[in-house]
């Protein structure tokens, strides 16, 4: 059974002889960076397992504490060219501060780069619009452009060079390598032409009003400007993928009103201790988990369970920290504080899920591993073909080389899976569905058979009196009165149901003397001088010797409905019967019918006898019944179905059904709103509503659909972008300038994150048309952008005459 231990200092979690550390990472630009850090950590002696999540910018490392320390791990990341630190466990605002710091840093880079690049844009416009003022500075444009580009290239763009050096140290390439190569080609080629011009002509500027030719400083400058713009927008949109975590964190109140030494004090939430009495007034948030000791109220638990209606709370009822008290005032005893509370457990579970990898991510990782070297190879081939085969000018060939280098984007591929998982799991948490990672998400889409445990899953888990029949001259209320009076002293599970039924009807019970429990049969006792017997048919027929043949058909009919019938009698005659059953939840049949319409086979598993089990299953609309199965044998029944080729999900109690949940392809645990960390299963349903099982599968399919769409976008973008950048369609007039290629690259990452954010629109039971249509629109928009960018580039291109020449050559 999975159990999340209380975390130790520095986010370390003990796991037998190993330790687990979570590191916050800085400086990653693409999935290649994440793989580079992951590889460096794995190669460190003592590291058992390492996983880096690019979208969440976190690393999870399991290591042998006898061989390596957290400081050593941070050193490994630093040596790889990046920064790492351990977030303080109690500082829930750490992630938000880190994200805001990153957004601000990226914006500042973009702002500096933009301000320095704008004059270069004006210089470029002077070539097209001769009427613009400033033609007199044309001879000085080269030297001014150099001065403005240097801080962009080596200041704003310094991170790209650092990343390239780190990658080379690890004998690989990453996105930094692509940007550094592309901008360096444009910058140093322009610098060479500038110095060569001055070397030929001396320090005296050439003809008055004439620009120095073959300078492309603006290409390098705008390339870095557009990339930093993309990074800033990407950081902002990535921040929105963790909005669910922020909302959950925001639920936690800062203070609690406690009773100490007879005084009422407002204290910080961190100072609340176990067993303290806490006062909650109308409209206030409940600070920690506990049990009500006085008062009553209605509590809004929607933010935890997804239940829209307030829940009535009375003495001895549990309350959950972070929920909102609506009407009355009450006092409760603190049972769970700090990291033990349900809210804290949910936050930690969602954080772990958002940092996990789905198996489909392996596909993206394989592509990313070879992506950059392949792109560099394609760029070199592009240069060789244009320059040597087609005889294009050096400028034309270099611009084609640079455009290919910068348009290729491993970022979009790296963001495809983690961003969708972050938004999908966050949305689930907001609706009371906790998905524990990428693997359960993926498995949920493959399920074709679901096994429901009966007690507490399909049924309410609490027996209720369903029928009270008089078989004598006594009224039904008198039958219930006598039965409840006898059962008041009984410890049998069904006794509570009968006692509660009488209590609800406000029936005054009578005193019982000479009470006796008859094991396996029932109870007996004397009430006002008469001895009464209450129990099963064996008590009546075998112990008393009274025939029930006259009532057999009626009793059997009730039993066929899955009800347990108990008979009330004296030594001489039968007085009446009380039927008790664990009733099917109101929503169970609706959930079962919905799943059956999806083509999923539904089974019910129970320890009940076959007749009772079949009767209960029929009420829920289930025809496949696995009856008389002992708890320890449930896993074997699941295994049999798996061996027949089915992908099986098990829905049951997260603790009692742990072996069966573990054996299934997907374990779905029905929680009770508390002890989330104790639950076994890949998905935990906080609210005991089987419709959430349908919602969990729907959400999983929506999330996996987004992941596949994102991967398609990433591959589609590169498939249409690289040929245009390589100027394959130059004979059609489509030539993509490097700076616009860089902008297109930035937009591709933003589109992937934006597509993932559409999952935030998901609502259980509702079709999200916007999320369905948007990807199609995005494909059309991207195609249009590429063609439009290429068209703009053609008009701007200084090599227009070369285009015509190469067009003739290609023909």
Image: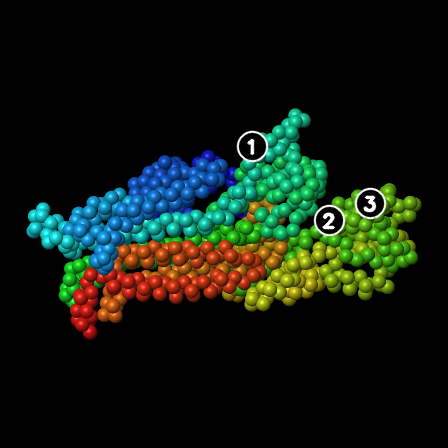
Q: Nearer the viewer, residue 601 or 113?
A: 113
Tell me whether circle 1 and circle 2 mark residues in contact (CB < 8 Å).
no
For discs 1 and 3, the disc positioned in front in the rendered view: 1
The answer to which quarter of the image holds residue 568 is bottom right
Among the two numbered marks 3 and 2 on one chain, the one whose residue lies closer to the N terminus: 2
Question: Which disc, if any, is residue 493?
Answer: 2
Q: Nearer the viewer, residue 341 or 391?
A: 391
Q: Is residue 147 visible?
A: yes
| Position of residue 47 in the picture relative to residue 129 (left or right) | right
The answer to which quarter of the image holds residue 472 is bottom right
Task: Determine whether 516 is above or below 755 in the image.
Answer: above
Q: Where does the image place residue 773, in percent across and percent down from the top left?
A: 47, 65
Question: Which disc, if any, is residue 516?
Answer: 3
Q: How many marks?
A: 3
The answer to which quarter of the image holds residue 48 is top left
Q: In the structure shown, which secondary structural element does the residue marked by tag 3 occupy? A: strand
**Residue at 87% of width from left, 52% of height from top?**
478
Residue on which disc 1 sits:
268
């Amino acid at each position: 059974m999975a159990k999340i231990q209380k975390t130790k200092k520095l986010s370390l979690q003990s796991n037998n002889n190993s330790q687990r550390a979570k590191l916050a990472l800085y400086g990653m630009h693409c999935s290649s960076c994440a793989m580079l850090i992951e590889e460096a950590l794995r190669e460190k002696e003592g590291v058992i397992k390492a996983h880096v999540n690019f979208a969440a910018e976190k690393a999870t490392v399991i290591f042998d504490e006898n061989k390596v320390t957290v400081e050593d791990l941070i050193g490994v990341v630093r040596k790889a060219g990046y920064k790492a630190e351990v977030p303080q466990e109690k500082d829930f605002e750490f992630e938000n501060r880190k994200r805001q710091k990153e957004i601000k840093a990226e914006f500042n880079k973009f702002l500096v780069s933009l301000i320095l690049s704008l004059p270069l844009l004006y210089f470029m416009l002077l070539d097209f619009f001769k009427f613009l003022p400033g033609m007199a500075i044309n001879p000085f444009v080269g030297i001014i452009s150099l001065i403005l580009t240097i801080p962009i290239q080596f200041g704003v763009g310094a991170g790209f060079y650092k990343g390239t050096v780190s990658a080379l140290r690890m004998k690989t390439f990453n996105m930094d390598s692509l940007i550094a190569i592309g901008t360096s080609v444009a910058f140093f080629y322009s610098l060479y032409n500038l110095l060569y011009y001055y070397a030929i002509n001396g320090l005296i500027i050439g003809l008055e009003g004439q620009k120095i030719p073959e300078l492309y400083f603006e290409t390098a400058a705008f390339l870095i400007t557009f990339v930093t713009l993309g990074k800033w927008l990407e950081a902002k949109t990535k921040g929105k993928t963790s909005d669910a975590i922020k909302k959950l964190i925001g639920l936690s109140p800062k203070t609690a009103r406690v009773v100490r030494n007879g005084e009422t004090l407002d204290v910080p939430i961190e100072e609340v201790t176990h067993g303290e009495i806490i006062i909650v007034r109308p409209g206030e948030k409940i600070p920690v988990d506990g049990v009500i000791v006085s008062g009553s109220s209605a509590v809004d638990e929607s933010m935890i369970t997804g239940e829209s209606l307030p829940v009535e709370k009375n003495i001895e009822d549990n309350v959950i920290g972070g929920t909102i008290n609506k009407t009355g005032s009450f006092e409760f005893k603190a049972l769970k504080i700090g990291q033990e509370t349900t809210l804290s457990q949910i936050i930690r579970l969602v954080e772990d899920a958002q940092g996990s990898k789905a198996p489909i991510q392996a596909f993206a990782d394989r592509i990313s591993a070879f992506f950059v070297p392949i792109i560099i190879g394609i760029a070199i081939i592009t240069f060789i073909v244009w320059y040597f085969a087609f005889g294009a000018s050096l400028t034309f060939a270099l611009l084609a080389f640079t455009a290919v280098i910068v348009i290729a984007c491993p970022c979009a591929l790296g963001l495809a899976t983690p961003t969708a998982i972050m938004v999908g799991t966050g949305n689930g948490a907001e609706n009371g569905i906790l998905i524990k990672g990428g693997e359960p998400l993926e498995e949920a889409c493959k399920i074709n058979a679901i096994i429901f445990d009966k007690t507490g899953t399909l049924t309410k888990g609490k027996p209720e009196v369903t029928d009270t029949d008089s078989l004598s001259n006594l009224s039904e209320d008198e039958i219930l009165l006598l039965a409840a009076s006898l059962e008041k002293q009984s410890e049998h599970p069904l006794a509570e149901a009968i006692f509660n039924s009488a209590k609800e009807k406000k029936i005054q019970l009578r005193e019982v003397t000479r009470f006796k429990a008859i094991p396996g049969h029932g109870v007996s006792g004397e009430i006002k001088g008469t001895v009464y017997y209450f129990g099963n048919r064996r008590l009546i027929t075998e112990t008393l010797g009274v025939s029930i043949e006259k009532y057999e058909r009626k009793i059997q009919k009730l039993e066929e409905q899955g009800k347990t019938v108990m008979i009330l009698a004296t030594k001489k005659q039968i007085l009446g019967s009380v039927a008790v059953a664990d009733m099917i939840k109101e929503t169970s049949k609706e959930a079962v019918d919905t799943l059956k319409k999806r083509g999923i086979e539904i089974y019910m598993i129970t320890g009940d006898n076959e007749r009772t089990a079949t009767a209960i299953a029929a009420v829920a609309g289930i025809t496949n019944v696995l009856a008389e199965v002992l708890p320890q044998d449930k896993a074997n029944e699941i295994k049999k179905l798996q061996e027949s080729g089915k992908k099986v999900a098990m829905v049951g109690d997260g603790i009692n059904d742990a072996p069966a949940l573990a054996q299934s392809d997907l374990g779905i645990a029905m929680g009770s709103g508390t002890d989330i960390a104790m639950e076994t299963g890949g998905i935990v349903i906080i609210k005991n509503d089987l419709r959430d099982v349908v919602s969990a599968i729907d959400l999983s399919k929506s999330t996996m659909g987004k992941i596949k769409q994102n991967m398609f976008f990433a591959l589609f973008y590169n498939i249409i972008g690289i040929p245009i950048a390589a100027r394959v369609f130059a004979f059609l007039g489509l030539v993509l300038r490097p700076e616009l290629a860089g902008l297109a690259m930035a937009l591709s990452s933003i589109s992937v994150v934006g597509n993932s954010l559409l999952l935030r629109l998901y609502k259980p039971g509702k079709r999200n048309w916007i999320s369905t249509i948007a990807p199609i629109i995005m494909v059309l928009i991207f195609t249009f952008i590429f063609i439009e960018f290429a068209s703009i580039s053609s008009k701007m291109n200084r090599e227009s005459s070369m285009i015509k020449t190469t067009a003739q050559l290609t023909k």
